[in-house]
Image (cartoon, rainbow, N blue to C red):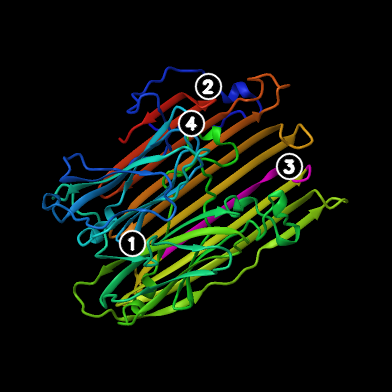
Amino acid sequence: MVPPLRVPLFDAADGFIPAVQSFSTSDPLPGYSQTFQIGAPPVIPNVPPACVVSLGWHSFANSYGQPWVIDNFSLPTSCGTQWSSITLQLNSSSKGRQFDRVYQVWIDGAEALRGCTDEPTKLGVYWSIEKDVTDFAPIFHTAKTITVGLDNINDATYTGIYNTTVSFTFYPASRAHPVPPNVPDILIPLQSGNLYPHIVLDGNIPEANFNVSNIPRNIKRVELEYFVSHHANDEFYYLNVPDEVANPNLGLFGGGNFKEIEVYLDGAQVGVDWPFQLVYTGGFDPSVWMPITHTRSEDFPSYRFDLTPFASKLADGQSHTIALNVTSQSQGALWYVDGSMRIWLDHTSATTSGHVDHINFPQTAPSVKIDQSGDGVDFAVSTHVAKTVSYSGSVGNLQTSVTRDLKFSSFLNFTQQTNIVVGYHNIDSTTETVVTDKRTGEMTSWSRTVVSYPLKLNSTFIPLSSDGSLYYYYLFMDHSRNIKSVSLGRRWGVSNEEERHVVKGYLSNSPTIPAGAFNANLHNATYQSLVANEAGAWIYGRDARAVNRTLVFDRIEPYL
């Protein structure tokens, strides 16, 4: 049994810090410490792989604008052509002083992995991430180029170099382990065509436009994957404020803390979602993210949009423009966006018939209230938004209808000349998809996905000297990512994924504060997942705790 999510006693340190238990690991690099995210590893068949394709290793030193490009990539014949599972593994290590950096892996321009490096120490850190990329199978048949980006600076101050390896493991398909139904017939990258396939939205570029051509005409299903991450003045977008109280000199960036990611097809909106609040390994107090990193920090989540209602439009034999947008970008913000389209074909028909029946994407402005103190320095901001979007369309005799309800609420209180911020930032959505046979009116499939991203935060910075060189800093964060899905029809499935991180960080460089009195960092992380479908059921859980960068408890309930 996977243990239930534990609720630590936030008011008492003794209730938060568990009894120290023995823990040992064999470091592949002597003296280096391992960092990790606690999410579930991929489910792979219990069979020998058909092949393992390694790209070798690469050192990212002064690597801005210089990605690692393998332009003669090809699979050996021993890999075969049909796979039950494909995994991507990235290993990296670094030693010295360095910022957190973003890494990305593209397969012929289709992004397969994006994550954040772990900040190194003097003794060195290493990490490994393994990701299921089985649904990239179509592009592996013709892939010629693999691109790995990791922009880094290496000089006398920032000495850390990221030594990185990337490999792919292919597991053969068989009667016992067939090709999964989520593998499309075609995968089309949404790429810039430049050295880095993504497009950077910088506050002045409102959207990223991708031209898509040579789309087959016998489409029966379409899905779009949207990769996006927030950086620079939107790195902590969930703490951004309305423009009228923004003050970049104090770290208060404008644009507000409500953001939407949007998808457009030939100028018409066809998708919307609200992005997860990423926390990078250098965020707030970097020491609290060692050795346990924050949710999906090493493998950023992407966003999937069902575009089947627009299949008839995409299959009209014309070129089309897909636009990916982020609303309310702050000045000086950077958002990296790209993606790919997955297409399933109707092999019984030469041309898709159907039409778009209904589109409703209301442009709902957030309700924002600002309460300021008498001196106008301290203030509080509350923001609320609720909206429902819907769209439907038919392919042949089947009509697909999608409805998404989204709710956002936030409250931020800034005091002590904005040195203290306390508040919450919550995102919730429910997406329901119904497929109906127009001839009979019967529902052939139904699915519902419920998403919740609750975030509570207290970030307190207290200057202890007139110039701010001496300080005391306190961080409290309680952040979860919960996704529940159920689908019924010809194929059924149930999944439930919950991850929660609760951290307390104390940091001070004042000589008047005794060492150890406040410099204690606590991190409690819990993860559990359940997946059940026609192929079987899998349960995974992990409960990990760290005190002052030391892992004191780590219990894993492996797949059952």
Q: Secondary structure at mark 1?
A: loop
Residue at image mark 3: 419
Q: CA distance from mark 3 to mark 1?
A: 42 Å
Q: Is residue 99 magenta?
A: no
Q: Which residues are magenta?
A: 416-433
Q: Quadrant of the N terminus?
A: top left
The secondary structure that most of the magenta stretch takes on is strand
> Tags 3 and 1 in contact by the CB under 8 Å rule?
no
Q: Secondary structure at mark 2?
A: loop
Residue at image mark 1: 109
**Residue type at mark 2?**
Pro
Q: Position of residue 93 (x, y in %)?
A: 39, 36
Along the horizontal axis of the image, is 98 left or right of 203?
Answer: left
Closer to the camera, 417 or 452?
A: 417
Q: CA distance from mark 1 to mark 4?
A: 33 Å
**Residue type at mark 4?**
Thr
Closer to the camera, 162 or 526?
A: 162
Q: Is residue 178 above or below residue 505?
A: below
Residue at image mark 4: 121
Residue positioned 53% across, 62% down in the render: 405
N-terminal label among 1 and 4: 1
Q: Position of residue 468 (x, y in %)?
A: 74, 37
**Residue type at mark 1?**
Gly
Residue at image mark 2: 18
Closer to the camera, 134 or 195?
A: 195
Please, which residue is most extreme toward the left here? 77
Q: Is residue 559 above or below residue 190?
A: above
